[in-house]
Amino acid sequence: MKRAFSLIEIILVLTILIFVGSYYGKTSTKTNLETAANRIILYLKETRYQALIDDKEELNDTLWHKKRWTLKFFRCDKDVGGLYYRIYSDENKTGHAGLYESLNDPLTNKKIYSTSKCEYRNNTSKYVLLTKEFGINDVEISCNSTSSLGQISFGKDGKVYSKLSAYENEYYEYEIKSPCIIKLKSQENENIEIIIEPNSGFVYKN
């Protein structure tokens, strides 16, 4: 009787541990997604605000629109793997904005930037490292007009663009006309959606 009772106890304890471990594993995945999404929403709002106060329009520059404040997603180097993003204004209009053209995190004052090496650095925000920090392995943008993962740019009037034209005088090309959805996907196939409204640039979580 004593041995049988002890065996039942062990089975019961193991069952509880498996259940609790499974529950907290799922909770952790959801928490990571929520944290990543909340940070991107904060950053998108800050990007929109920056665009409103930092008017890039220059009448004597036919490519001024390329300097609009932008959040863009990238892939890390193949030997590293994963995803990251940057927020920047491409002041040189080269398509390769650097560290000092990047936006500061309003909470930590660190640059919202990484290189394709996806390394942790003292002067850059860790939250841009989507895979390393949050276990996110895919990003889908419903309004993506690029050949890459995609980007979101804001104009001085709050309007939203899915791409910045490389051609002169195409200031208002690629403006989104319907809500744009950024879907973050975890390695466990969980996902969360961020919605960006046209015209206003209002950002919220689905």
Image (cartoon, rainbow, N blue to C red):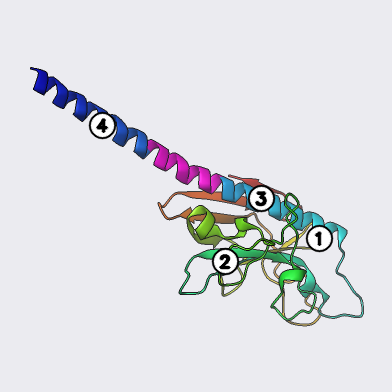
Residue type of the residue flagged with mark 4: Thr
Choose mark 2 or mark 1, whichever is in front. 2
For the residues labelled 2 and 4, the Cα–Cα distance comes to 40 Å
Residue 177 is left or right of residue 132, and the answer is right
Residue labelled with disc 3: 41
For this orientation, the residue located farthest to the right is 59
Disc 2: CA contacts within 10 A as few (<14), some (14-19) or many (>=20)? some
Choose mark 4 or mark 1, whichever is in front. 4
Q: Report helix, strand or loop for mark 2.
A: loop
Asked whether disc 2 touches disc 1, contact meaning CB atoms under 8 Å apart, the reply is no
Residue labelled with disc 2: 119
Residue span colored magenta: 23-34
Residue labelled with disc 4: 15
- The mark that comes first in sequence, 4 or 3, is 4
Residue 9 is left or right of residue 187, and the answer is left
Residue 14 is left or right of residue 60, and the answer is left
Residue labelled with disc 1: 51
Residue type of the residue flagged with mark 2: Glu
Asked whether disc 1 touches disc 3, contact meaning CB atoms under 8 Å apart, the reply is no
Disc 1: CA contacts within 10 A as few (<14), some (14-19) or many (>=20)? many
- The mark that comes first in sequence, 2 or 4, is 4
